[in-house]
Amino acid sequence: MLVCAGCAAAMASCSQNPVQEGQSDFKYLVDEFADLKIMKYKVPGWAELSLQQKEYVYHLSEAAKYGRDIIWAQNCEVNLPIRHAVEKIISDYPGDRECQDYQNFLVYAKRLFFSNGIHHHYAEDKFFPSCPQEYFKSLMEASGVTGDQAGLLAAIYDPAIYPQRKSNNPNGDIVAESAVDFYDNVTREEVEAFYDKLEDPSDPHPISYGLNSKVVKGADGVVREEVYKVGGLYGEALEKICAELEKARKVAENETQKEYIGTLIDYYRTGNLRKWDEYNLKWVDDTLGTVDFVNGFVEDYNDPLGRKATWEGLVNFRDAEASKRTETISLNAQWFEDHSPVDPRFRKKEVKGISAKVINAACLAGDCYPATPIGINLPNADWIRKEYGSKSVTIANITHAYDAAAKESPKSTLNEFAWSEEEIALEKKYAALTDEIHTDLHECLGHGSGQLLPGTSPTALKEYSAALEEARADLFGLYYVGDPKLVELGILPDGEAYKAQYENYIRNGLMVQFTRVELGRPNTEAHMQNRKLIAEWCYEKGAADKVIEKKVRDGKTYFVVNDFVALRGLFADLLAEIQRIKSEGDYEAGKNLIETYAVHIDPELHKEVKVRYEALHLKPYGGFVNPDIVPVTVDGKVTDYEIRYTDDYLGQMMEYGRRYATLR
């Protein structure tokens, strides 16, 4: 589960202006366009790694980057052909590159690269070029783009073709209407019937059926799976990934790492999901290594049925000093579970294997690139969490990059949307810390808390599972960030700090986050639905006592928390209900919560928020370029690996397209 906010020596050429680590004039902001800003992140602690550890990170990073084409293909079947056409134009177009139409084309290209396809990375609606279709056609022709130009142009410009990456139509067939390439020629009913035959509700260790496959119906009318594996679907990319994992395995830090990398390779070669479970069991048990990674088909947010996983990669290493905080939280995991406000039937009697750390990312890839989470808790299988535990991480250098880039801007949403100077002062004092603590609690304990009742399917909540799971973890964090236990443990400095998190969360959930949604559109992304659900539900349930009060001043709307203790009680009530829904697999109750509180945005408030935000000239979404990891050779022998930073977003995208393309 994820929390959002967002090479070889030859790779050095992707940076027109490489910045060496430690340079004092380091600027985090790299580029801005459309609704996006591109940043770079520092990799602190790199110099302290051994040569072996650096080589380990290097090969893990190469393995991660070779998965890039997979996420493009999964997001929509036309994404790769369109990307190849765009890359060809950028590389070979001989005409005027300064005119406005070409500049508009470049903005589209940058958006395409950012979203790993033609759909907005967050809102999931298709976006369109600002240049005319005929001009785009002329670019293709002049650049020598071959193939079905008419088909590509239709996919790019026609709003009726592939309109949404994941359909949010509650009255339609969300499988047939979604652009994601997880299904072909099948209906929702056929997919669910296919997996109903496979799943055994009595299995205490259920296989994550469908996680690594595409469901298709052939001309014979038979529904079957095409499995992601070497020799199967995405086999070319997985072969490259396995080759780099083999190199990483040779220089891993310990035997446990070597063993589970071998199991991961076996999984990629066979597609056997029992091998995936075996890998996760070994991976979650490795808590001693400094270097760690995620590599695989992991999260199911993009699947309309919440079953199929997109490919992602993340390479990182431990921040030892910052991890002391998360270690304190994980050491007290049983106390938090025992004192949770949920029904005791849904609590774990024995919390196992909870490990947490603060990390610094060294490479982002797949569905974690360019937009990336700020926290992760894995594995996702409920039975593994219950019996073996999970790993939780907070990504420190990504969070720091967001904060540092924001300080490079003269304006902020805090000054615009906070009601009072007291609110602003409280958040400036405590918000950065409480944001990190909330992420720690969300990932370290929230996702790992609770248990399913015997016989409850882990996929029972279907298309609502992602938003409800994020809400459950967020509520766990919100409830405990206000607990005196955190002051007692030395995690928070005093009993006032949590109020900054409560104010910010409510303000964001009820208002500020809708700067990211186009006017007239519903709220569809799982993390945004989670925040709206929590804030709207608490606002409604606390209305009689004005726990949260709507105020208007000078024509502007504000939401003010009046009673922090009562709000914490509301968080507890909603956490108890969502845990019940998950533990019992109550699909209808989960659907009712999402459809009532998480989807529909008040149009007048939405318009106001957009106008106020646009006046700030800020970008609501952010993502990153990776640093290059460059081998340093002396007399033909690698003696070190250097970190080199780039300010060239488009250059990195083009270089990745040349270097890591595996699928056509």
Image (tube, rainbow, N blue to C red):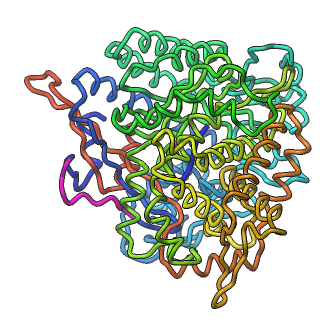
Q: Is residue 151 visible?
A: yes
Please tell me which residue is depicted at 51% across the width and 56% down the height of the picture: 497
Which residue in the rendered view is the most extreme toward the bottom?
554
Percent of width and height locating residue 31? 38, 63
Q: Left or right: 47 with respect to 81?
A: left
Please tell me which residue is depicted at 67% across the width and 56% down the height of the picture: 528
Residues in magenta? 22-31
Q: Is residue 84 visible?
A: no
* Quadrant location, the N terminus: top right
- Asked if the magenta segment contains residue 469, the reply would be no
Please tell me which residue is depicted at 45% across the width and 24% down the height of the picture: 240
Residue situated in front as seen by the camera: 280 or 237: 280
Percent of width and height locating residue 397? 38, 46
The overriding secondary structure of the stretch rendered in magenta is loop
Please tell me which residue is depicted at 82% across the width and 30% down the height of the picture: 217
Above/below status of 478 relative to 555: above
- Asked if the magenta segment contains residue 24, the reply would be yes
Percent of width and height locating residue 116? 54, 48
Above/below status of 515 relative to 221: below
Picture mark count: 0
Residue situated in front as seen by the camera: 605 or 445: 445
Above/below status of 198 relative to 344: above
Q: Quadrant of residue 609?
A: bottom right
